[in-house]
Image (cartoon, helix red, strand yellow):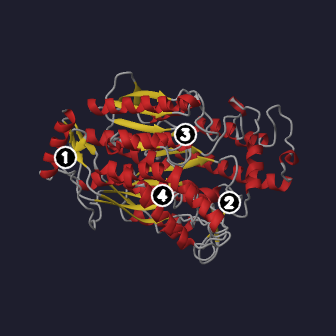
Amino acid sequence: MKKRILAAALACLLLAGCGVQRTEPEAEEPAAGGAEIAYVPLDDRPDNVERVVYLAESLGYRLVMPEEVLYRTALDGQPKNFDSLQRGEPWSLYTWVLDQEAAGCDRYILSLDQLHSGGLVSSRSMTGDEIPIPGGGTTSATELMDSLLSALARDENNVVWLLDSVMRLAPTVGYEGGTLEDYDALRAYGAEPRPELDGSGFTVENIEADYRRSGSGEPLNPTAFGLTEARVDEYLAARSRKLRLSDRMLETVRGDGYENFRVLIGIDDSSAEECIQKNEIAYLRSLLRQGDALLSGVDDLAFKAVVKLYLEETGWTGANVAVRYYGGTEDQPACIYDFQPLTSIIAEHLEFFGLTETADAELQLLVLTQPADETKMAAYYGALIDDLNDCRKQNRPVILIDAGNNRYGTAFHDALTKETELGWLLSYAGFLDMAIVTGTALSHGVARYAFLQNGGQTDATERAFARTLADSVIKDFCYRNVVREDVAAYVRDNLGGNANNFWQPDIDRESVTALLERRMTEETADVVKNLERSNLISSLAPYEERGWGGIRLENYRFPWDRAFEIGMDIQLGDFTEPHEKVLGLYIR
């Protein structure tokens, strides 16, 4: 009897033509212009370019950037910038920033690794201070920085965010001849415990001296790590250069006239051991002023800076958040590249964004950790999904972090796609290294939460928000654990190539892109359907929602001609009235 009633109801719905509304994407106008931020990216990867653009536009800003050729990184064998450079061009970036200042810009987010070294990868290997000037002559990274900071400090209306990093334990494979064997040897050397400095011992010179000593104070033998003295000298010269530039920058902004400058330093890939970074981190932290911060993660620095700029400009006074962990390993580092337990990293980020952890709060942070018991994986993520759906019923907005470090395979993502409303989330992060997922998820989640509290939404801000959420979910669910493996296997097995660099050896890159497009079309279908049937929170007080429209993914690409990450364009249809379910089916 129940089956006949259900069938009759479904028939009536179908006859009435009540299917889920899905507005097809059309060619879109550029986002409406807002206050400008002059932004020098860390490099040209998606997390440092398009995703920062989405986030800024979701808050009503317009990001202004230099030409890509000025900040692009080229791996070995790939086409170079200006036919000669594997890195960005600091002198031209310096003059670009001055041009923005002359044009009246008063908001800046500047990646110092780009301005000092031509990008993050290059900053790990540069050993000298000399910077070429196009057309002839040289200057120095120190002189460029001093000149730029003093120029920006002359205008008291400027707000300047300076992004810097603590150098990771080893340089990049496939850049300037770096091999995996070289990386492994230098990482082992860097991960070795060093003597711990404190108090009056905190000087750059003492830190440099301890680079070559073990935790017991004995000299480290390079050959024990498979390294030559010359290779260690190069490695430590790059570390010293970065540390000294950071030291000089922090000394400068501690002076008069730099009150509107903020410093945000990220800890690049690290280790839970008492490694070579430990004294660097402690020393730099001791130099920070009120409003500065040193946190885990580098590729999320621009996200954090954009959001903090917005929070400070809008008078954010903080918020309460309820934090729940699932998996049982939150008291451990989320991966081998973290130097603190996950709980500590989350606590530091909560403090940075002005969030206070309380048991009963409107804002919810749900975190899936690596499984303490492999036999209970389904129970861990099942409990999270149940709580997520309860939050949905109670209209409690959710920030979701997958810190499982691939241990759940596709099972967690599949369950989320089938059992939850993905487009309703404030933010999600799980893609790329675990060291940055906390900052990524909280940056985007806090941005959305604060923006909803402040009001002022426009169609442009809402579309930018939808893009940043869709980008994060689709790349993690569909690319990281599924399509990326297919791409890597195809490059390796069918083309005899290197998945970490499609130019060494030179392979048929068009065929790799064609495979990417085909496999992403197949794997994204269910996730896109979920998003298109989702509602997004459009107001908190009063609580209101809007329905997602259609989504079209196009222009798939490999920004660095490697399988590790992808770029894509996300076209959106118009938002709709909230989608509703009847008998488990969407009727509009």
- Mark 3 to mark 4 CA distance (whole Å): 23 Å
The foreground one among 580 and 394 is: 580
- Mark 3 to mark 2 CA distance (whole Å): 24 Å
Where is mark 1, residue-wise? 587
The residue depicted at 61 percent of the width and 65 percent of the height is 491
Where is mark 4, residue-wise? 46
The answer to which image quadrant residue 176 occupies is: bottom right
Q: Earlier in the sequence, mark 4 or mark 2?
A: 4
Residue 129 tag number: 2
Where is mark 3, residue-wise? 294
In front of the other: label 1 or label 3? 1
Instruction: Identify the amino acid type marked 1.
Output: Ile
The residue depicted at 44 percent of the width and 48 percent of the height is 303
Label 4's element? Answer: helix
- Mark 4 to mark 1 CA distance (whole Å): 36 Å
Q: Label 3: how many residues lie within 10 Å, few (<14), some (14-19) or many (20+)?
A: many
Instruction: Identify the amino acid type marked 2.
Output: Asp
One can see residue 59 in this view: no
Q: Earlier in the sequence, mark 3 or mark 2?
A: 2
